[in-house]
Amino acid sequence: MTFEIKERDLLARIGRLKTKSGTVETPLLFPVINSTVQPIAPRRIREDFGFDALITNAYILKKNFQNQPVEKGLHKFLDFNGVVMTDSGAYQILVYGDIETTPEEIVQYQEQIDTDIATILDWPTGWKFSREHAEHTVDETLKRAKKLFKNKTRRDILWVGPVQGGRHLDLVANSALEMGKLPFQIYALGSPTEVMRSYRFDVLVDMVMTAKMNLPIDKPLHLFGAGHPFMFSLAVALGCDLFDSAAYAIYARENRYMTEYGTSRLDELEYFPCTCPKCSKTTPKEALEMLTNERQIFLAEHNLYVCYAELKRIKQATKQGRLWEHLELRAHGHPTLLQALKRLKKYESFIEKHSPATKKSGIFFFNSVGLTRPYIVRHRKKLIERYSPPKEAKILLLMPQTQLKPFHQSKEFKEIKKLLRSTFNKYLNEIHTCFYVAPFGVIPIELDEVYPLSQHEIALPLDRETIDYVAKQVADYINNTNYETVLLIHDPENWNRNILNTCRKICVKKNMKFKYISIKERRSKTMLTSLKKILQKALCEQP
Ligand SMILES: [Zn+2]
């Protein structure tokens, strides 16, 4: 097997990709080597920076060096003993129009230079093009993809099948579906570079998700031109396993300094917010005084360190089940990233389906953006599809979340439990306690220890969308069950009147009895006394 998955979180995977020059761990970033202007030698990229793979352009190699890489072999030619991937020149089509080679020549050339991972000469859709053009690029790419399997002569090279279609999502879906039928070892999303350059990360989410949902899910997915570390976690969370980046070098030429949360111009910086080996020995002022070439190398090296560090953080977060928290952190680096994170709502069901069920750590809930998280979606689905309350239950006692978790061990519940045991012992089976809880909705008491219903932390006061979400879950729960009476412990401080109004409305609609007690009385004995009276009356009135 070429690709083996070791860990998952959201759609992210930590995996192992086997190539003829060695096995590499994913998510993996391939720094782009421009064989004509390269600020850092390929050998150093592995030895000093830790990158086990790199990518270079087969078309540029062919155009500038013709047979040299063929005679020496690509690894020797580049002086790099890791994994080498080659891109085909498709990007040059996008920038310069047609190029002076044919799809067959590019396939043959990549075999001759002995690359490890090769790309067919696809036809990139680009960004601001008509639908007709997009359709043409999808068809032409598919035609070339099919031809590959007739023309290739080696079996030890991994081939990449790019998906096209650009912002026309139905075309992306179709392209992914058709490419997915061909036996590529790796798939890729083509032409997102301009989408990313214009900061349309929400469109990128649509493109990646559309491709992902229509490709074989167990195959690795490469995102072409995903250059900036501040969006790596988004791409990884969407299930991109491989990336290439030329940005570290391009930004360096433009005196731009990358951080994991954005970009600064070198002349804006008074301090370096970085402890990489370069930045810890230099100040921005000193960097500005360097010769142009020296400064470019300095910046390219720093940029590469930042990329690598962010990738390691993402892997660690994936392993700990904290990738969502990491995503939220990064999303606050730029409004367009937060917008992209919000777009995940559209795909929450697919993400939930393919996310792992249990992780070791508890989850942090900051605000309603987190409502898309798989655990929350999963709890909602399970409650609707697979849960029914105990058969004898006639009264739903609905309590607000307590500070202490699991809820059944809280002081608030213990007081009520004492009352129920002492006064209503005969009827215990008829009274079913559930909690209304942000962010999950309704948690039946017997489930409150199921992960992560007790293993989460939330920030109070809750935002409006979260309150509305929980209220909707309460309404759905009451609607889908058959209690005779709903008895709500109303908590105006944390929930305003939302839960109260929701319960009342749904009970009127279903013609059920509804009572409530306000929690304000909690500290006095009045609440328990009221509760006792209401329960006595309710149980008396049972048929
Ligand atoms: Zn640095």
Image (tube, rainbow, N blue to C red):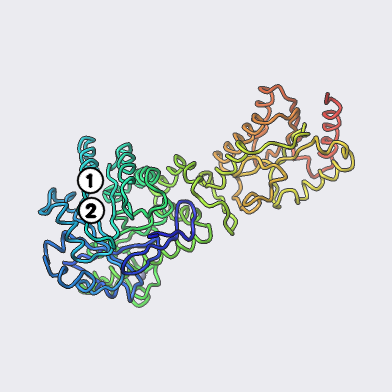
SS at badge 1: helix
Residue at x 40%, y 72% (from the top left corner): 275
Q: Contact, CB < 8 Å: mark 1 with mark 2? A: yes
Work out whether residue 526 or residue 469 is closer to the camera in this orientation and state it: 469
Spot occupied by residue 118 in the image (x, y as percentages of width and height) = 25, 59
Q: Quadrant of the N terminus?
A: bottom left
Sequence order check: which comes first, mark 1 or mark 2?
2
Q: Quadrant of residue 294?
A: bottom left
Spot occupied by residue 189 in the image (x, y as percentages of width and height) = 31, 49
Query: Which amino acid does the dot numbered 2 rest on?
Result: Ile
Q: Quadrant of the C terminus?
A: top right
From this view, report whether residue 543 is shown above or below residue 254.
above
Q: Quadrant of residue 401?
A: top right
Q: Is residue 325 left or right of residue 281?
A: right
Residue at x 60%, y 56% (from the top left corner): 362
- Quadrant observed for ligand 1 in the rendered image: bottom left
Work out whether residue 535 or residue 521 is closer to the camera in this orientation and state it: 535
Spot occupied by residue 385 in the image (x, y as percentages of width and height) = 60, 36
Q: Which residue is identified by label 1?
A: 141
SS at badge 2: loop
Work out whether residue 312 or residue 23 is closer to the camera in this orientation and state it: 23
Query: Which amino acid does the dot numbered 1 rest on?
Result: Thr
